[in-house]
Image (cartoon, rainbow, N blue to C red):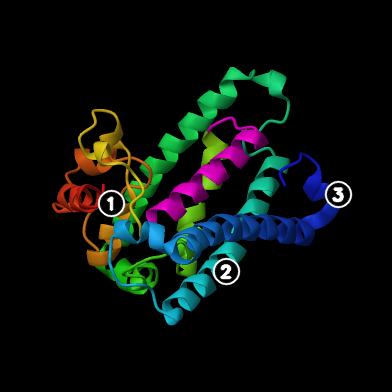
Amino acid sequence: MFSENFLERNGVLITWLASTFFIFLRYLLFAGTAFLISYKAGILCFLKRKIQKRLPSSKQLQNEIAHSITSIIIFGLFAVLTVLLRTNGYTLMYFDLADYGYAYLAVSFVASIFLHDTYFYWMHRLLHWQPWFKQIHATHHRSHNPTPWASFAFHPMEAILEFAILPILVYILPMHPIVLLAWSLWMISWNVLGHLGYEIFPKEFSNSVWFKWINTSTHHNLHHSNSRGNFGLYFNFWDRWMDTNDGKYRQTFENIVNKHS
């Protein structure tokens, strides 16, 4: 998708179509697989770890998928924008692994995750400013009891804000297409996990010196159910530092995992 001459060879429209198809395929694969495993084929196995006991309605699922498709179209446009910025020399993207070496691939991947987590936290808090929440973020919060299909279910303006991190990353950080691909897969994986509706992490997470800094499915599910706190994406750093963890988070997590361990 991000080959150096792809845009010149195929044009803006083909690049947008290819990017959109790739993003849609990624969404379908990750969200669809998670939904089938947790709500269909594996529902009896996972039911004991359901965070909210009720199951989603057909109308909710249709709404999540419809808004996600709109977001995916917008994400595809951002992919084209990123390629255009690259071809005009406005990014630090590179294609020769020898430029930075193999070790830097890991460094840039980790850096992109932490930068994205910081961006998301503050962007997310901004979206909870009441005027913006009502006009924009409320679309995502229609899923009070989210499923994996809600991973990309955003208002168009929120979709723009969500994916704006991509051109920002490649502007400030040298990134190889391999890292961009790994980052995109990491992002959808954790997005699906946050909207899974089932808690899959072990009970040790809440008390572990290391794992307590990683957000669980319960963390984001609580955010959807009451729209308070729990603004982080991957990690619990900013919520802890800014005292924005939902006060019921730890107890809710422990009640779920201890009751059915």
| Residue 195 visible | no
Q: Which mark is residue 69?
A: 2
Q: Disc 2 on helix, strand or loop? A: helix
How many residues crowd around disc 1 within 10 Å: few (fewer than 14), some, or many (20 or more)?
A: many
The residue sitting at 47% across, 76% down in the picture is 63
Residue 51 on the magenta segment:
no
x, y percentage for residue 45?
40, 57
| Residues shaded magenta | 173-195
Instruction: Report the amino acid beneath label 2.
Output: Ile
x, y percentage for residue 91?
62, 37
Tell whether 22 sits left or right of 14: left
x, y percentage for residue 118?
36, 41
2 or 3: tag closer to the N-terminus:
3
- Pair 1/2: label in front: 1
Tell whether 171 sits left or right of 83: left
Name the residue that disc number 3 marks: 9
Above or below residue 69? Residue 248 is above
Instruction: Report the amino acid beneath label 1.
Output: His
1 or 3: tag closer to the N-terminus:
3
Q: Are marks 1 and 2 in contact (CB under 8 Å)?
A: no
Q: Which mark is residue 186?
A: none
Q: Disc 3 on helix, strand or loop? A: helix
Q: Are marks 2 and 3 in contact (CB under 8 Å)?
A: no
1 or 2: tag closer to the N-terminus:
2
Query: Which is the main secondary structure of the residues drawn in magenta?
Result: helix
Q: Disc 1 on helix, strand or loop? A: helix
Q: Which mark is residue 219?
A: 1
- Pair 1/3: label in front: 1
Q: Nearer the viewer, residue 81 or 59?
A: 59
Above or below residue 243? Residue 67 is below
